[in-house]
Image (tube, grey):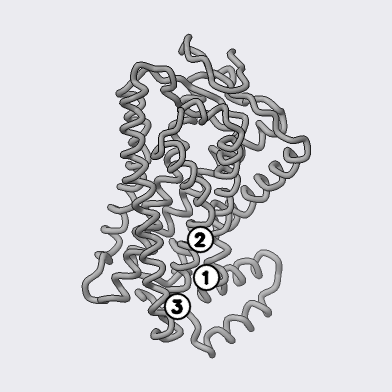
């Protein structure tokens, strides 16, 4: 075991290297509480999303958007199980849960790319698809469920690109970072460092920065249509815009970190030594939990049909059927359900 307070010493490579930053005493219980809240809300909320969309048509959008929403829910659950909950264990015990298992820590460093890459590409496709529907309903990306699954599978596979590059380049070092309670891979002080910096910059631009720009432009353009559409269409646009806005806010620290470290290319040691970068890394990690936990909440407030489904299910669980029936009748009378295919 190799523990450092800054730049990890790379050789030998057959062990996990630890970058140790002592967290403020008061922050540990706050981070544990925030992480547990994220896990509970994510698992319960996305249960409603997956069951509701698969069995009950609870969110009424076009088929492509529904497939992407299902996969966003799956990626949030994946992130909770493999990232958020292990992080809680590390914060509670004060030590790395993977410290004695190089293989597990290596795999953990690979899967960390899946969620941000998948989310950025799927939210990008979601907003772009809705914009094209508004611009020209007859010529859009909405080729149906098959097209949606093709986009989703492509997003998942794109998240595996860094892991494949790691394996091809070789000479990598696995680092456990106490700022984020996560494992990561570095090529610092490796003969392949220059090659990886170039590939990392290209990958960051294609998979992170460009999708961010598309989401921003598409969302801004959709705002133009809100005043012109009926309440039915306006509600579906509001749902997509809320998902996009949440994604942009929660991933903004991560985007700043990517631009600072990967694009502007300061000394790679800053990634480990500099206190400002350390704080940015921590912010990028824990602010991102907002995206993991909140999509289902946004659906509840922006989709009347999903709200009715949640209330009906909750009523069956806790015996409030009369209240649910009253809400459903009110919703039907006011005609606020989202138009299917809008």
User: Mark 1 or mark 2, which is nearer the start of the sequence?
Assistant: 2
Label 3 to label 2, Cα distance in Å?
Answer: 15 Å
Label 2 to label 1, Cα distance in Å?
Answer: 8 Å
Query: As drawn, which residue projects farthest toward the left?
Result: 139
Q: What crowding class fits label 1: few (fewer than 14 Cα within 10 Å), some (14-19), or many (20 or more)? A: many
Residue 86 in view of the camera? no
Q: Position of residue 93 (x, y in %)?
A: 71, 28
Dot 2 lies on which element? helix
Q: Quadrant of the N terminus?
A: top right
Q: What crowding class fits label 3: few (fewer than 14 Cα within 10 Å), some (14-19), or many (20 or more)? A: many
Residue, x 74% and y 35% (percent of image)?
24
Dot 1 lies on which element? helix
Label 1 to label 3, Cα distance in Å?
Answer: 9 Å
Mark 1 highlights which residue? 306
Residue 72 in view of the camera? yes
Mark 3 highlights which residue? 338
Residue, x 44% and y 22% (percent of image)?
188
Dot 3 lies on which element? loop
In this view, 23 is above or below 323: above
Q: Determine whether label 2 and label 1 are within 8 Å by CB.
A: yes
Mark 2 highlights which residue? 49
Query: As drawn, which residue projects farthest toward the right?
Result: 26
């Amino acid at each position: 075991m190799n523990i450092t307070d800054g730049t990890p010493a790379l050789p030998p490579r057959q062990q996990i290297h630890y970058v140790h930053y002592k967290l403020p005493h008061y922050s540990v219980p706050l981070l544990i509480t925030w992480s547990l809240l994220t896990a509970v809300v994510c698992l319960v909320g996305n249960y409603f999303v997956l069951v509701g969309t698969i069995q009950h048509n609870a969110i009424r959008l076009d088929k492509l958007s529904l497939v992407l929403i299902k996969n966003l829910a799956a990626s949030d659950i994946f992130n909770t199980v493999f990232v958020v909950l292990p992080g809680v264990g590390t914060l509670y015990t004060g030590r790395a849960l993977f410290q004695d298992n190089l293989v597990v820590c290596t795999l953990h460093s690979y899967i960390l790319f899946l969620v941000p890459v998948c989310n950025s590409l799927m939210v990008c496709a979601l907003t772009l698809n809705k914009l094209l529907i508004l611009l020209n309903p007859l010529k859009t990306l909405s080729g149906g469920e098959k097209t949606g699954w093709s986009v989703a599978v492509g997003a998942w596979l794109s998240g595996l690109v860094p892991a494949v590059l790691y394996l091809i380049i070789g000479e990598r070092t696995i680092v456990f970072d106490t700022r984020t309670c996560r494992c990561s891979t570095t090529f610092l002080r490796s003969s392949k460092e220059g090659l990886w910096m170039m590939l990392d910059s290209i990958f960051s631009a294609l998979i992170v920065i460009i999708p961010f720009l598309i989401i921003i432009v598409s969302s801004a353009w959709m705002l133009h249509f809100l005043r012109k559409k009926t309440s039915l269409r306006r509600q579906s646009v509001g749902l997509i815009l809320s998902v996009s806005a949440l994604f942009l806010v929660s991933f903004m620290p991560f985007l700043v970190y990517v631009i600072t470290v990967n694009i502007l290319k300061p000394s790679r040691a800053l990634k480990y030594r500099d206190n400002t970068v350390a704080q940015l890394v921590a912010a990028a990690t824990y602010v991102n939990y907002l995206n993991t936990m909140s999509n289902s909440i946004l659906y509840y407030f922006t989709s009347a049909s999903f709200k009715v489904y949640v209330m009906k299910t909750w009523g069956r669980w806790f015996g409030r059927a009369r209240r649910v029936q009253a809400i459903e009748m009110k919703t039907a009378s006011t005609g606020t359900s989202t138009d299917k295919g809008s």
